[in-house]
Image: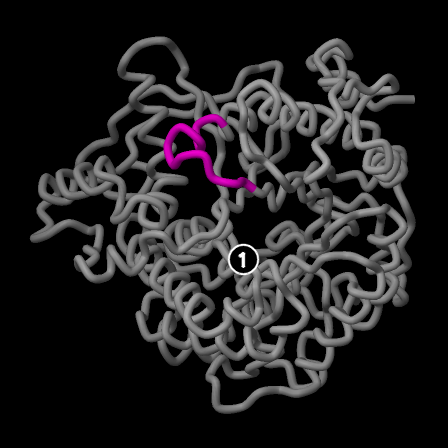
Amino acid sequence: MKTFVAFLLTFALGSADINPRVFPDNFKFGVANAAPQIEGGWDEDGKGETIWDHLAHRHPEKIADGTGPDIASDSYHKYKEDVAMVKAMGLDHYRLSIAWSRILPTGYPDKVNQPGVQYYKNLFKELKAAGVEPMVTLYHWDLPQPLQKELGGWLNESVADLFAEYARICFGLFNDDVKLWITINEPKQVCQSGYGYGELAPAIASSGVDDYVCSRNILLAHAKAYHIYDDEFRETNKGRIAMVIDTIWYEPGSDSPADIEAAERAMQFNYGLYGHPVHIGNWPQVVIDRVAERSRLAGYPKSRLPEFSKREIDYIKGTYDYIALNHYATNMVNASDAPVKDTGYWNDIGILTWRQPQWTGGEGGWFTVVPWGLRSLLVWLKKTYGDIEILITENGYPDKTGVMEDDDRIAYFEGYLSACLDAIYEDGINLTYYTAWTIIDDWEWLGGYTWFMGMHSVNFTDPGRARAPRKSAGWFTDMVKKRCLVKNCVK
């Protein structure tokens, strides 16, 4: 029997709204995970402490259930089982991250941890034998704790240089194993949530100041890694590299010019803050102008937004081989200016966000079920940055029940994949990858083990961390096999 959420999803989408077309031959399906969320083995075989290890151990009250990633899904020991599940589902690629502190325990490049290297070598060997392409992220939020303690983390530009050295080491070590690289996952979350709101590790609250400093340094880190790859490894590796940027889709709350402008401004402050320097050069002009003006009115001697030099603008521009996109939510937007003295990031944007009452979604504002929002976002990316190949690197459905008959998740995937087909065939979007989050339950950051996002469950009370397929795993497997969403496919 379908859950009530699944009923709402099905009702909202309507069977007639599901695109019957077959996915193009070059379209690839996969799943994603991240080292700090699934590996466990937090201090095993020479691995160093990360900012998330540190936060969970020192401040368990910040985690919904007081847990940490010490064991997580235990993929450090059960990676063969995980790869076997990926293979059994007939998937093309598996997105994973390398833990910086498992390769370089202190974060510094003076000592390479060979057991950590061997773990990833073994994992890549397993994927190759299964015929699955690895999509590898170098940084998925897990900064080595010594770099935070000694240098101030991403507030220090020297961390960008250390990341570049770490990237160089990985490019060399795994040159024969990986062809699809991601430098950094979701810089907005690293900076706005980690150094702005103070929610995510390292939990520094300095919105409208330190989050902008972090953004500048993380863009430089990405560019340095990209150029190292381009100059030293591309010829032999023959792969591709980009940075993952996540964003909500912001839909104007009315047809008024003010709300239309506010929605575009929201997109520029969220996606454009990172996409504009990479694709066009420098911060978006609306970001430069608003932060400068609000800084001046608040009495700052200069803009809170740090400048890029001409050399840095040119250095960052063009550092992509594709667009990598994470997407989980849509918001409606109205214009709303905050008092001048309130100089936080969201006050700089000057918007009021809300959601339609019929939308289903999760807690914390990071998730809604609005498939057309993804299609609108894909169209916006093409209009803003040109006809660039787009890879969806995360999209998925969380729940807090862990139900095995997860019809709501099936309806979610059906709706969002239908939106992908609409974008491909109706809008001419060069979309080539869809990566579901995720194949197994994991440690969901501040949510701990209270959020379930896997197409396979993990029993976190079992020392063996037993996996079991949910109904969605079978649905996704069948969909990949027939390469369409309906019974009677249209080619």
Look at the numbered disc 1 and give the secondary structure of its residue.
strand
- Residue 459, how many percent across, how many down? 87, 55
Q: Residues within 10 Å of mark 1 (few under 14, many from 20)?
A: some
- Residue 428, how many percent across, how many down? 54, 25
Q: Mark 1 sits on what residue?
A: 240
- Residue 147, how many percent across, how many down? 43, 77
* Image position of 211 (left or right of 102): left
Give the answer, above or below, for where 335 lies relative to 282: above
Residue drawn 60% across the image and 79% down it: 173
Magenta highlight range? 379-390
- Residue 161, how many percent across, how many down? 37, 74
Q: Residue most toward the bottom?
A: 110
The N terminus lies in quadrant: top right
The C terminus lies in quadrant: top right
Give the answer, above or below, for where 419 lies relative to 468: above
Give the answer, above or below, for where 299 lies relative to 415: below
* Image position of 280 (left or right of 250): left
Q: Amino acid at mark 1?
A: Arg
